[in-house]
Amino acid sequence: MTHLLRKSFLRTAACLGLLTSLSSAYGWDEAVPAEGAENLPGVLPAVNETDGQTIYNIPALTLLWESQSVINPARDKVAHLAMDEEVVFVQSSAGVVTAINAESGRRFWSAQVGRNDEVAMTGTSDSQMVIIVTGPVIHAFDKFSGQKLFAYRLPNPPSAPPLIARREVTTGPRVDITRSVFVPLVDRSVVAYDVEVLHYQGINGALKPGVPRALDWRFAGGELVRFAPVAGEERLAFATDAGNINVVDMLGAEKGKSRFQFLMNSTTTAPLALVSRDDKEFLLAACDNNRLFCIDMKTDGSMQWTIPMARPVTQPITVVGNDVFVVSEGNELLKFDLTSGVPVAVSDSVQAVVNQSESIAGELPAYGASIELRSSGLLSFSPIQVMNRSTGQTVTSLIVDLNSAVQDLTFAADEQNQPALRISDVSRKATGFRAAKLSDDAKKLTLEFSDFNPGEDFEFFTDLVHLDIPSWKISHEELIGAEVNALVSPMRAAAVASSASNRRIEPLPPRSVKGQIKTVSRPWSVAGVKSLVAVSENAVYYSDAYDRVVAVSREHAGSSSVTPTQEYTLRINNRLTDRVYLSTASGRVACFTESRIELGALPVPSGYGLGWLLYPQSQLTPDFARYHQHPGGRPIMPDVPKQDPAPSTVSEAGEEMP
């Protein structure tokens, strides 16, 4: 694959010069350049692979493993998929549960849970145990060995999947571990059981001495709960079908009692999401009146923010880091800031619009000057575009002044203080480009033209210099704040037409118009999303209408890449790690990991100066999945020193040594 990519890049570069805007390419991470390549020279160097520099790593999905769950494909199919950071659980419609190692794909165990074809809820797990409710019975297993721990019959069938929560309770110097399971029931209540009590009863057939009943507490809200509860450090939250969020204590003397109720005034449309950041617990909820809510669960219902949406959110809310990802009913994926709720904006480019209209009082504008400068991407690879959108005005010179830019930049120059520009022959001829000059401090670049008329465009490449940023790493965002000054004058044809008209407008002399470079942004959004699959450090993976896994940049949602996965029709919404888990209806589970193809770049001669040649260097794959919610639980691979090679037992003459 690397060989084919290399040939493709070489062929493309040879034909086109490969001057492209790489920063808009999906999910590419900036890497460290080769030594001595911080600033590219204006003179073309010799072209060989040691002269290059590493520019980007391209994320791509690679199949890590495949595993077959226990299922009868003739009459059975996958009913539920569940997972945590360590195990993937496949539940068949016949009631068979298969536990698979999430990292290696090795099958841990499989077991029949409940009766054949009995309706089951999606399982829930913690660090040691998995709980599955089939019919009205709670079944608990060791999640690694599959040992049956207990079974307990509920007073009523469940209305939503259960939740298991493990918490530490500190009493003086003593620390007790409590593990509880919470189940919403069809009688419009939520019940809580102590797992240790149920485990003791399952082994001994009776309750522990001093324990009057297995039920720990019951909250009767009078409204049906259709989504699984979520548990914080001390409180439990669940949303009713009517759109009311109930938060109750789960520990201490007040456990089972309401702390507050939050009214959304509309039907709940998606499961609750809960994340902890610093000393806050952010509870996110969505309802049918097209609103998204964020509540601090540690308070008495203080709302952090709310957002009106165009359509309701009907899929699970995913929070990774400070990013909130939601998929609306219109198959649109959006990203919001967790702390403020503000929709994330993407900086597409920077732009300066220099315009001015001139006319005599009481008359229509005679001459309209409008010059637009735009830049997008890394400046070593993306051109700066200058467009003359004036009416009857020609541009004779253009000055780009970096003195007011957000970064302390200068233009790259040679020993004679000539700017290092790369301009195509097409731009030169179209605009009558004459010369380029630099100020003594290399802060001002002056471009001179003889025939830059309305409707014409001029493009040029330039390298900038910064003390701390390599030139190949400087993007359009560093230009924000720079000033643009254009010298314009009326075209001869426009002046003659004005004097021949009845408006008595005299031709205006050449004049200078000014503007400033500002950012151009758009909301972070992706259309055509069937379901969100996973989020990595640099990419967002989703399933489209054709059951393909599509990746877009987590930073700017641009330049998608597609992995054909149509045979896998079931997806796990993985908010815990950066792995992509898919399954067929017959129970064949696949795990995809994000590998990275490292690209290099070489400066090469082209028809108009200096071009760039891209080629793949190496392919890298991470060792373990990245844990989003519990990063401390990620396995650590120890550094094992390489062994020294064993001494040879054969002499240089080819004889075996004693």
Image: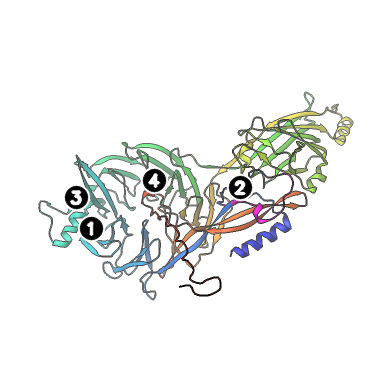
Q: Mark 1 or mark 3: name the one nearer the start of the chain.
A: 1
Q: Which amino acid does label 4 sit on?
A: Ala
271 left or right of 12? left
Left or right, 182 with reference to 69: left
Q: Residue 2 location in percent, x, y? A: 59, 63
Name the residue that disc number 3 marks. 216
Pick whichever of labels 1 and 4 is earlier in the sequence.
Answer: 1
- The three-letter code of the residue at mark 2 reads Glu
Q: Which mark is residue 530?
A: none
Where disc 2 sits, the SS reads: loop
Q: Which residue is drawn at 87% across and 29% down?
A: 502
Magenta residue span: 40-55
Badge 1 marks a residue whose secondary structure is loop
What amino acid is at disc 3?
Asp
**Residue 482: x percent and y percent?**
66, 33
Q: Disc 4 or 2, which lies upstream in sequence?
A: 2
Q: Quadrant of the N terminus?
A: bottom right
According to the image, label 2 marks what residue? 35
Quadrant housing residue 349: top right
For the stretch drawn in magenta, the main secondary structure is loop
| Neighbours of disc 3 within 10 Å: few (<14), some (14-19), many (20+) | some
Residue 52 placement (x, y as % from top left): 65, 52
Q: Name the residue nearer the viewer: 80 or 622.
A: 622
- Identify the residue at horizontal 52%, vertical 62% (top origin): 548
Other-residue count near label 4 (Cα within 10 Å), few / some / many at <14 / 14–19 / ≥20: many
Q: How far, Cα to Cα, is label 2 from label 3?
A: 65 Å
Which comes sooner in the sequence, label 1 or label 2? 2
Lower sequence index among marks 3 and 4: 3
Residue 486 magenta-highlighted: no
Q: Residues within 10 Å of mark 1 (few under 14, many from 20)?
A: some
Q: Which residue is disc 4 drawn over?
A: 285
Which residue is tagged 1? 156
